[in-house]
Image (cartoon, rainbow, N blue to C red):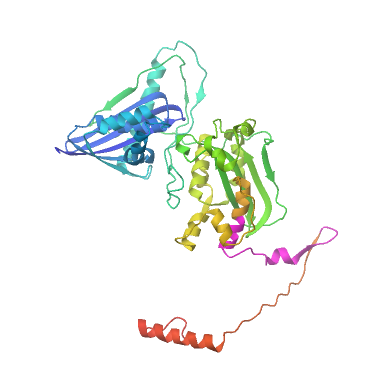
Amino acid sequence: MSQTITLYVDGACRGNPGLGGWGAYIIRDSGEEKLCGGEENTTNNRMELTAAIEGIKHCPTDAKLIIWTDSKYVKQGITEWIHGWKKKSWKDVKNPDLWKLLDATCQGREIEWNWIKGHAGHAGNEMADQLANLGADKTLEQLKKAPAAVEAPKKKAEPDWLLNDPFGLEFADSEEDEELALEDSTLQVEASLTPENSVNRIDSEAEHVEIEIAPAATEPAKNTELHPMIVITPATIDMSGPRQLILDTETTGFYFQDGDRIIEVGAVEMINRKLTGGSIHIYINPKKTVGDSVNVHGITDEFLQDKPEYHEIADVLFDYLKGAEIIAHNATFDMNFLNMEFKRAGFVALSEVCEVTDTLAMAKAKHPGQKNSLDALVRRYEIPQRDRTFHGALLDAEILSDVYLAMTGGQVSFDIDALTHSHNEDGSQSRAALEIELPIILPSSEELEAHETWVKQFEEKHGTPCLFAK
């Protein structure tokens, strides 16, 4: 090999689909090169793939390439999934044209593929991200300068969101929520224009490119009235304290980065480890078919036709959830989808305004090497069985509340405030005396002897007295 070249590649998309850009930051012994380009109507994944293709094509074929991408879709696709896709003749593969082109571009080259967490402050990745946004900006400028044959209505750009944990299941223990730079701008889309992709080479001697990116809106306008499809059950117990919301979602699939959407959200409220009776439940029209996921949740396309879209219920749901501790089983999966949906609707990521607790991670720590699915935990903790022929968000949230309480010490039914308050006929409250006599269980002589033997063995082995020694 004549030389080793490092590439940082990235893609961006303002709306999915929407205006997009790609960037490749190339570092070689002789200096740096910066490439960027964009398309008028594309997706984030297509821009991620295009960045890799253009970056590789720009390098000599005899050079060893070390490529860094923040897209697991690209990294795992080219190193793992592509072999199966070829065997199946690319059946049901999204973006097959770009995957085939990337595969052909890689042939005969020595390439080392690496994943890097996006927006984590790494200089190379940050430069590639800036180049991708610059590519989108330049494409937008070209569209504005081109003559318009037909006046098309303006549409608002949606937040840019990147690939993060494609399955939600394999990376449940990792923290990969990415802080995305968003640009909220209005662009004029000309319906008759079909410009070719614009590729812009930036002089390696040029100064660092600074791109101003406007923050996402944090206070969207409120709906004037509650949507009839939103079911909010008020709490039946008046309690004060930090709110915990045991939450679950149902989706059209695992791939939120490829367009899968949330179709159901359910959450039950708990304060001071006591369920208040409060809950929220929403069905959502994903504007796409549910596909094979209907076999999991039983929610059909026909059922969802008259349900609201996410942006119609986002403000109500965000207000209900924000500030609470979200408790979910495999929380990474649910939070990835919720963060994506709220960002698309113009909100900040839910994980920025809520603390998150993952019961799957808790179960793995508590029961290593064992099955820790929700069904397995229900059996392990002898939770009353419910019909789960189909998964439902609210049903699973109710089951998870029982599992969470059992895993963290059991239901606190000895709630002194709740047990000692009684309501009088005039509506006032009075506190009744609560007398609980707890039994004292003393050790037997055999148990005391065994304990003394163990303490002596510990001291002989370690050379220091045991903590439990008298």
Q: In which quarter of the image is residue 220?
A: top right
> Would residue 218 be seen by someone viewing this image from the given angle?
no
Q: Is residue 3 left or right of residue 146?
A: left
Q: Picture coordinates of residue 454 (x, y %)?
A: 44, 84
At 48% across and 43% down in the image, what residue appears?
336
Please report the bounds of the magenta region as a residue range: 401-427
At 37% across and 29% down in the image, what residue appears?
96
Above or below residue 115? Residue 57 is above
Above or below residue 337? Residue 370 is below
Q: Picture coordinates of residue 16 (x, y %)?
A: 46, 30
> Would residue 450 be seen by someone viewing this image from the given angle?
yes
Q: Picture coordinates of residue 432 (x, y %)?
A: 77, 69
Q: In which quarter of the image is residue 144?
A: top left
Above or below residue 23? Residue 407 is below
Task: Give the residue at the far top of this rendering.
Answer: 149
Q: Is residue 414 left or right of residue 149?
A: right
Q: Does the magenta stretch include residue 10?
A: no
